[in-house]
Every structure is written in structure tokens, then in C-alpha cells.
Image (cartoon, rainbow, N blue to C red):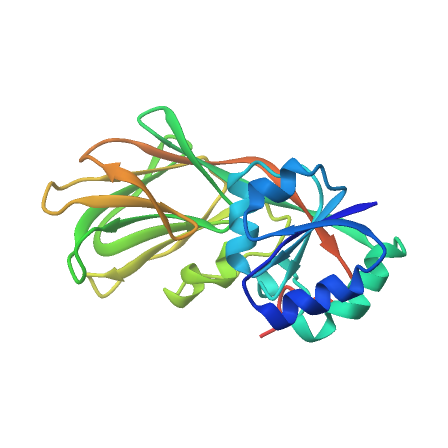
Amino acid sequence: MRIGVVTSGNDHLDRRIESALTGEASSMDETAQVVLDADPTVVIAVGESAVIDLVRAGVSVPVLPVDVGPGVESVPAESIEPAIEALLAGEWTTNGRPLLSASVDGEHVATALFDATLVTSEPARISEYAVKADGDSVAQFRADAVVTATPAGSRGYARDAGGPVVQPGAGVLAVVPVAPFAIHVDDWVLRGPVTLSVERDEDAVELLADDREICSVEPHEPVEIAFDGVIEVVFLPSARSFFEE
């Protein structure tokens, strides 16, 4: 087994991982692509940014998330040594976590593990958004943003915005308006694909994928969010439960 490690810049934790891997074939780097180029069997990803970078780099081997949170049932940093011991002993399984494909006007622009969001470029400004599911109109509303989240992402920004926690494997997306202008605005659990659009040309709107800026979105330009592929996440007994607070 060859272990890749996408490090976080936390020198203390990185040294602990390196020590636990002593004698094993491994490659460690802060850049996901460099680690993947070393052809690992499995990758340890330290922190949320490391996992996101691996997704963006097209990772196809199992990933052990460390200190990423419950959305991907990650291992806490304090348990890293026994986690690596179990990994090397083959005492692990994998769970497939769905990825999102984001396309703007028919062109694929991003892949995301957690969420895809339309948001105004200027702080504290609102826009008008429309949501469709499988071609059917769902709603139109004014808000700061609208976020579409996978089950993993439903534990993060979407939940902070008042959305539901979606059980892994449910095959649905959570779509949540962020700070809506009206008092009574729903959020939705939808099978998808989901199409978002900007309905008023008031302020510039950006598409974010896993909180990273992707591109500007013009009014009435369709942004389709659909499930597309999975990331295989290493599951260990020491991992956090998905529903753990």
C-alpha cells in the first residue's frame, strides 16, 4: 500500500502522521495534484481544503478525511495514530459520497463535494433567484444567496442558513435561500437535477463551488446542479458519526 498525504500546514499534526507512517511507502505535500501524481493507493486528507482540492483534482482512490467534520465522517486529529494503524492493517471500509456537477448555460464549470451557491458579489446585497427541479418551477424569491447542498454539505453552510440535514444515501439535494427578503420562504429537499437562475439584473452574482469562486452568472443564465460521480471516503470506527454535533 502506498499512502498519500495532503497536508494542512499544521506542522505538529504533519509530523505525527509522518511518524505513524514510518517504514511505509508514502508521499506528503500540501498540493493535492502532487500527491495524486505519486500514484497512491489511498490518500489521507488533513482539513476540509485538502478534501476539496482532491475533488477538484479528480481523485479516484479512497480518501481518509482528518478534521473535516461529520459531513464526511472524518477522523479527529487526536485519533490520527490509531486511525493510521487501522488503515495499514486493512481494517476499514469505504462509503461513497456523491459529488455535484455545476454547469452554466450547458457548460460544465465545477465539481463540488459539499455545495454550490449563487451569491451576490457585493456584501449585504440581494438578488432575485429562481429554482427549478427536473424542469418544474419550484419557487422564485429575493435573498442574499441560494445554496444547493449534498447530504455532506447539508451539515455545513446550508444548515447554518436554516436548511435540513439530509441523510447520506438519500439521493436528494437540499436547496436553501440564504437570508431571504420575505418572512416566509421555504427550503426544499429535491431529487434533481436542480436549475438555478438569476431573475433580476441588479448586482453581479457569482457561482461558488465548495465556497470557491468559479465564475460570474448572468441574468436568466441557467445553472444546472446535478449528481455526478462519487468520492470514496474511508470509514473507520474512530470516525465521527454523520449526525454528531
- Residue at the image position 24 percent from the left and 37 percent from the top: 217
Residue situated in front as seen by the camera: 66 or 177: 66
Residue 44, quarter of the rendered image: bottom right
- Residue at the image position 19 percent from the left and 61 percent from the top: 182
Please state the horizontal and vertical placement of residue 153, each as a whole percent of the image.
50, 55
Please state the horizontal and vertical placement of residue 132, each as a whole percent of the image.
34, 37
> In the rendered image, which quarter contains the C terminus?
bottom right
Residue situated in front as seen by the camera: 180 or 149: 149
- Residue at the image position 44 percent from the left and 49 percent from the top: 115
Q: From the viewer's perspective, is 59 left or right of 143?
A: right
Look at the image and tell me whether residue 204 can be seen. Answer: yes
Look at the image and tell me whether residue 113 can be seen. Answer: no
Q: From the viewer's perspective, is 122 left or right of 214?
A: left
User: Exactly how many numbered labels are in the figure?
Assistant: 0
Residue situated in front as seen by the camera: 11 or 85: 11
Q: From the viewer's perspective, is 117 left or right of 124?
A: right
Please state the horizontal and vertical placement of residue 48, each as a whole percent of the image.
53, 58
> In the rendered image, which quarter contains the N terminus?
top right
- Residue at the image position 57 percent from the left and 45 percent from the top: 32
Please state the horizontal and vertical placement of residue 68, each as a whole percent of the image.
58, 63
Determine the residue located farthest toward the left in the rendered image: 202
Q: Is residue 57 above or below residue 19?
A: above
Determine the residue located farthest toward the top in the rendered image: 106
